[in-house]
Image (cartoon, grey):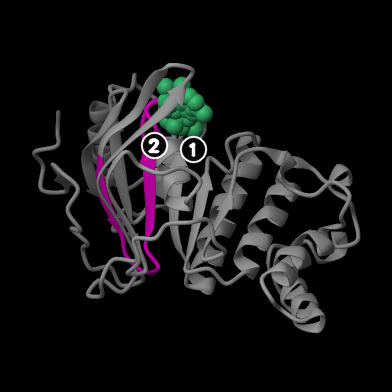
Amino acid sequence: MKNQQSDVSSRSQPDVKAKEDGPVTSSAPLLSVEHVKISYRLKNTLVQAVDDATFTVMPEEKVMLIGPSGCGKSTILKAVAGFIEPVSGRISFAGSTNITPGPDRAVVFQEFDQLFPWRTVLDNVVYPLRVTGRSKPEAMAQATTFIEMVGLGPARTRFPHQLSGGMKQRVAIARALALGPPMLLMDEPFGSLDAITRTRLQGDLNRLAERAKVALLFVTHSIDEALLLGHRVVVLQGAPSTVAAVVDVRDINGPDDPHYRSIRRSLEDLLGAPGEEEPDGGN
Ligand SMILES: Nc1ncnc2c1ncn2[C@@H]1O[C@H](COP(=O)(O)OP(=O)(O)OP(=O)(O)O)[C@@H](O)[C@H]1O
Ligand SMILES: [Mg+2]
């Protein structure tokens, strides 16, 4: 284990280091997850998914949740989204512990079928804006801006079945960002994409998130994706999981940076991951 290194904190403290283009670090956390335990009821038994999760996300910060399959990453995201309730512990978002689903934590999933199949690209983005109270002209203008921002202006009148997987994920991202949320919750949004599309969307997401000044809580099981996108990486271990470490990765420049390789090795050790993974974030 290398979680004794100075760049790897051994529990989930809000150990936000300064970075020129990083988020504001002196304010209160936007999201605070404290000693959260989560179980599912399955017939007459309880399936414990998360044993003890503690971490924070600051405004505009990009925090990656990484861990082996089945360790409870999606479960934590669902609890932050307000879809399920922890058995114990506390989740606080923007100062409130009343965590119910809301547009202030827009969710983007891995599945390509999260769009309404009977609505065009434009209508898919307009719809939640109308539901959350925008006037029609306001919703149309906002939707158009974000569709352009993800590069889908020419496809705005198409239906989901007329789009590639990458295009569908762009629509889902545009739809989420158009709501103007302080935080996006993303559950392996690029996991089903080919490596080239994934790399392109990772770069786009970085730019879009900075432009929209949105915080990200992003689930991945790719170490490289976590290093490319994240300011900090929350490493989960075990099933039910606990937080093994919170690693600050904001000053890492890219796969050629020697620091990248050493942090990557630390994460591999923490995850018990075998050897090499594609440096493009492949999994
Ligand atoms: N609706 C459910 N009912 C019962 N058990 C569930 C339910 N959803 C998840 N689980 C269980 O909770 C545990 C954590 O699941 P979760 O989906 O959060 O894992 P994950 O880390 O997201 O995995 P993956 O990387 O494969 O997506 C698993 O044991 C899973 O079987
Ligand atoms: Mg999952």
Q: Which mark is residue 223?
A: 2
Q: Which mark is residue 100?
A: none
Quick one: quadrant of the N terminus? top left
Q: Which residue in the structure is indicated by mark 1?
A: 281
| Secondary structure beneath label 2 | helix
**Could you tell me the amino acid type at mark 1?**
Gly
Which of 238/222 is in front?
238
Residue 277 seen by the camera: no
- Counting labels gives 2
**Snapshot quadrant of residue 225:** top left
Q: Residue at x 71, y 45 (%)?
A: 114
| Secondary structure beneath label 1 | loop
Q: Residue at x 77, y 64 (%)?
A: 127
Residue 172 seen by the camera: yes
Residue 36 x %, y %: 28, 43
**Snapshot quadrant of residue 270:** top left
Q: Is mark 2 within 8 Å of ligand 1?
A: no
Give neighbour class at mark 1: few <14, some 14-19, many 20+ (Cα, 10 Å): many
Which of 95/200 is in front?
95
Q: Which residues are magenta?
A: 53-73
Residue 130 x %, y %: 74, 71
Answer left or right for 255 relative to 6: right
Q: Is residue 236 above or below residue 133?
A: above
Residue 154 x %, y %: 86, 64
Q: Residue at x 72, y 56 (%)?
A: 171
Answer left or right for 129 relative to 13: right
Residue 34 x %, y %: 24, 50
| Sequence order check, earlier mark of 2 and 1 | 2
**Could you tell me the amino acid type at mark 2?**
Ile
Is residue 58 located in the magenta-colored stretch of the structure?
A: yes
